[in-house]
Amino acid sequence: MNKRHSGQRVVVGLSGGVDSAVTAWLLKQQGYEVVGIFMKNWEDDDDSDYCSSNIDFVDAAAVADVIGIEIEHVNFAAEYKDRVFAEFVREYQAGRTPNPDILCNAEIKFKAFLAHALRLGAQKIATGHYARVRCLAADGGVLEAAQTQAGDGRFELLKGLDPSKDQSYFLHRLNQAQLSKTLFPVGELLKTEVRRIALEIGLPNAQKKDSTGICFIGERPFRDFLNRYIAKEPGPIKNEAGRTIGQHVGLSFYTLGQRQGLGIGGLKAKGAQRGGGEHAPWFVARKDMESNTLWVVQGHEHPWLQSFQLTAQDASWVAGAAPPPGPFSAKTRYRQADASCTLAAGAREGFSLTFPQPQWAVTPGQSAVLYDGDVCLGGGVIVA
């Protein structure tokens, strides 16, 4: 075992998944004193088939036993409901499509969890995210992130080395103080290597399927879940010609670019529509909250689904200040390939981007995240 970090306490967020399990094992091999914490963030219908943290905790506890570390069960459900879920509902009621995972990272995993870890005497926290932290000294040299703290230099958030698993998009709201206390060990590895390590050391969750979506929804139909919190207000579905071709159940239940669940799949338009023929699939293109109208178009490449620019608000910059205007790349949704863009001047609380190539279904409520190569600079919430 490497003893170079002996005496340094790291608190690892153990989710029950393989990524956080390997994170804890790697840190222990490096000589850290590792403590595991299982975060319970949701209590409503937690015993249902869709979302049970009990199963995940059993897996996390089994991992802690194999690795030989302590684990603590901490309940952040009240903080989650107040800081994350309430905003999630407000955004959907306003007709936007929020990303609660981004808010959860900023408000729970790297705020409430970090504060709890520091109370336990931790020097650092660690999670199983596929991202990296780099600390640049004043002379431009790179410092070892594990040995640094706030004030040592400028911390950068980098993409994970596995391009298919990179999660920097979800972490773009982290600030200098948070990054100075954070380690992402698996961000240096490919997912296949993480699985190999888990099998090699005999972790009980080595073959566990990756979780998808957000816990409080789980695998249940999304519309069924929203029904419990948002009132339905049906209205017309119209095509680009203004012809009513169906009825929606409530604008909150749809997102731009949505193809499934529109209830108009068998309808044909009179004549070919722009972007597709009369048999082309329908997509949600616009939501008019004032008239309670859902506008749909035919064809994936329809002009209404293409955007050459966007505006974002509630900006958060990793360096603490906006980057200078100029050429960068951006993602307007997770798993999207980086798109070349130009950042306009005056980016502080909000910013504007222009794209040489049109971006598909740019969606209010989602985040536009800016990159300079592998460096995640920050981003904001898309408003238009």
Image (tube, rainbow, N blue to C red):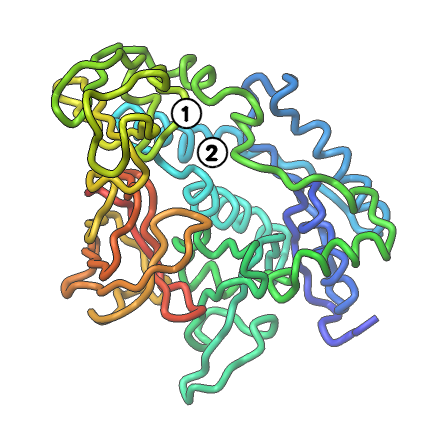
Tell us which disc is closer to us: 2 or 1. Answer: 1
Viewer-side residue, 284 vs 74: 284
Residue 233 higher or lower than 384, as above or below:
above
Disc 2 from disc 1: Cα separation: 34 Å
Residue 343 higher or lower than 210, as above or below:
below
Q: Quadrant of residue 151?
A: bottom left
* Residue at position x 83%, y 43% in the image: 204
In this figure, what is the number of numbered marks? 2
Classed neighbour count for the residue bearing mark 2: other residues with Cα under 10 Å, few (<14), some (14–19), many (≥20): some
Viewer-side residue, 376 vs 85: 376
Q: Which residue is mark 1?
A: 260
Q: Which residue is mark 2?
A: 79
> Residue 145: where, in percent of width, then height?
56, 72
Residue 43 higher or lower than 73, as above or below:
above
> Residue 234: where, in percent of width, then height?
26, 10
> Residue 364: where, in percent of width, then height?
26, 39
Give the residue type at disc 1.
Answer: Gln
* Residue at position x 42%, y 56% in the image: 337
Viewer-side residue, 124 vs 93: 93
Quick check: 373 left or right of 204? left
Q: Which type of secondary structure does the marked residue at label 1 adopt?
A: loop
Give the residue type at disc 2.
Answer: Glu
Quick check: 235 left or right of 147? left
Q: Which type of secondary structure does the marked residue at label 2 adopt?
A: helix
Residue furthest out toward the bottom: 139
- Quadrant including the N terminus: bottom right
- Quadrant including the C terminus: top left
Viewer-side residue, 42 vs 356: 356
**Mark 2 touching mark 1, by CB under 8 A?**
no
